[in-house]
Image (cartoon, coloured by chain):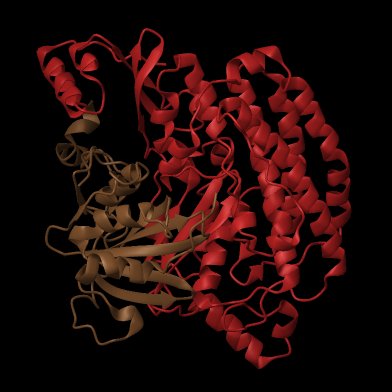
Amino acid sequence: MAVATPPQSIEEQRRWEGNLDQLRGLVSERAITGETMLLNMGPHHPSTHGVLRLLLELDGEQIVSCLPDVGFLHTGIEKSLEDKSYEKALPLTDRMDYLSPMSNNMAYAAAVEKLLDLDVPERGQVIRVVCLELARCASHLVWLGTHAIDMGAMSVLLYAFRERERILGMFEMLSGQRMMSSYIRPGGVWRDVTDDFLPTIKQFLNDFPAKVDDYEALLTQNPIWKDRAQGVGVIEPDVALAYGLTGPALRGSGVNWDLRKAQPYSGYETYDFNVPLGEHGDVYDRYLIRIQEFRESMKILNQAVERLERVKGPYRSENRKYCPPLRSELGQSMEAVIHHFKLWTYGYDAPDDEIYNAIESPRGEIGCYIHGTGANKPRRVHFKTPSFIHISALPVMSKGYLLADMVAIIGSVDIVLGDCDR
Amino acid sequence: MEIPAAKDPVSAVREVFGDALLHVKEFRGELTIVVDAERIADVLDFLRGASGLVFNMLSDISAVDYYPNDYGDAFDGEESDYRPERFGVCYHILSMLYNRRLRVKAFAADEDPRLPTATVVWPAANWLEREIADMMGIVFEGHPDQRRLLMPEDWHGHPHRRDYPLGKETVAFSFNEAEIRKHKPFATD
């Protein structure tokens, strides 16, 4: 943590005061007079998970107010999407929440499908569910490792990344890419699962529950962990709703809201799983929920893999106006060549109207608003991302806690700055 | 506890706000109501609290720019064509109790676009509105924090407007660095 250097000249002093003036009304009056201390945490602090800068107002060690400063990873993805046809814009969405690119792909693809009124065949939906739940596990594993290492438990990271590596290996089998997969596309998925995918995921599903028990053995009853996590970063359910929290951060406060249950997509209504809920809304409950979600994801994955063997058929829509034909058709059908050429050069037109579609990502609700133009490029694409909302709620979650707790609170809401800044 | 029966948001808003409800449309099963920009905060507050509606959560606020064409024309009755002004601001609200979504939309003029803030209704609107103020240049009156959110504070223009070209930022080389620095007083801090 870097403390701002005191001004060296009158000119600097004035500039410093000018900046302080900007903060009037945002920090307490005591900070303006110098009674409390203003401290910069980040943007290069290891526990801020990327490039988040927090301007903390401290009374001793206690946090009086907190001003998050974001935008360091702003890459103009939403603006770039306006200049690309719908299909070609997809790889950019990988780069928002780089820890669960499959969820972003799904949010975007599902929104485009809704705009086009395009259906996805059943096998495509099952493959999507497999990908989304694997992505949930992979993302939670990074969260678990980094959250633990932030709080001083060094070894969990190594265990968590060991399993994550296997999931990324499976993504590579599916899409050829470990992280930026671009696998889930409007109309279905890019290609069918490979032959070696099923044995690999079965082996993983067999091994993983014991690993989750290992993580729990390291942390759940650990007295130091409990001391750091229990009763810290408490957010009441009504406050959480007012601040728009979603996902584990909301369920930690005991609000039963999961889009997979409430507004199912991709056939989630046909799977049997529970939504784990917390009671106290503190760091510890949010930790327990994500650990439970590993187990629920395993449940869904077991059912999905069983279906994957049973359900045959196309893995992406057969509507050739929106989905490219198979390679094997190209040599035989002139129609297929025309569709292929049209799709990969011009794309397709979407109506001049607006839709909003939301899915449950590992972090919470990721919503996609698309306004078409009637041609092949959107007028506006906007992503409502969970990290953005959660960082905006950090001030209310951290008020009154100690500086050291801030690290635990940031970790517990599981933010990704690429997701926040887009 | 008994849950009161769900009410139709359109007729409820029409009953209370009358002429402030300007337009209603449905597309792909999504209901959109367009209301008078000046009353938007009141409408949202009503939708949040009224029994039978209880849109308790603000999912998202997104702004759309209808530049360069099709805005300001006379409304010819086509569903998607109601675009009286340049900027549209969509409030996507969600009722967890009745499990439904609603889009409330308000329009802001090309010259000096202004809307009342929704932060008094949901604190969640704080950053969502700041982002729009930053990227789209719509001023939210009464917003507690008017600084830019994503772009640097010395940035000129609002990148998500349709008349703001891609790739506007000049790359700084040694020959033009001084010229670029002149426009960025804070960058030297």
Quick one: which residue is furthest to the bottom in this view?
A: A334
- Residue A303 appears in view: yes
Left or right, B109 with respect to B106, comes to left
Left or right, A354 with respect to A121, comes to left
Q: Which chain is red?
A: A
Q: Quadrant of residue B142?
A: top left
Question: Which residue is drawn at the image coordinates 27% and 39% (left, top)?
Answer: B152
On screen, A125 above or below B44?
below
Give percent across and percent down for residue B93.
41, 57
**Quick one: quadrant of the C terminus of chain B?**
top left
Give percent across and percent down for residue A410.
50, 28
Q: Which chain is brown?
A: B
Give percent across and percent down for residue A13.
14, 15
Give percent across and percent down for residue B90.
34, 61
Question: Which residue is drawn at the image coordinates 67% and 48% (left, top)?
Answer: A135
Question: Which residue is drawn at the image coordinates 12% and 57% (left, top)?
Answer: B112
A173 or A355, which is in the foreground?
A: A355
Left or right, A180 with respect to B14, comes to right
Left or right, A113 with respect to A75, comes to right
- Residue B169 appears in view: no
Quick one: which residue is furthest to the front in this view?
A: B2
Q: Quadrant of residue B182?
A: top left
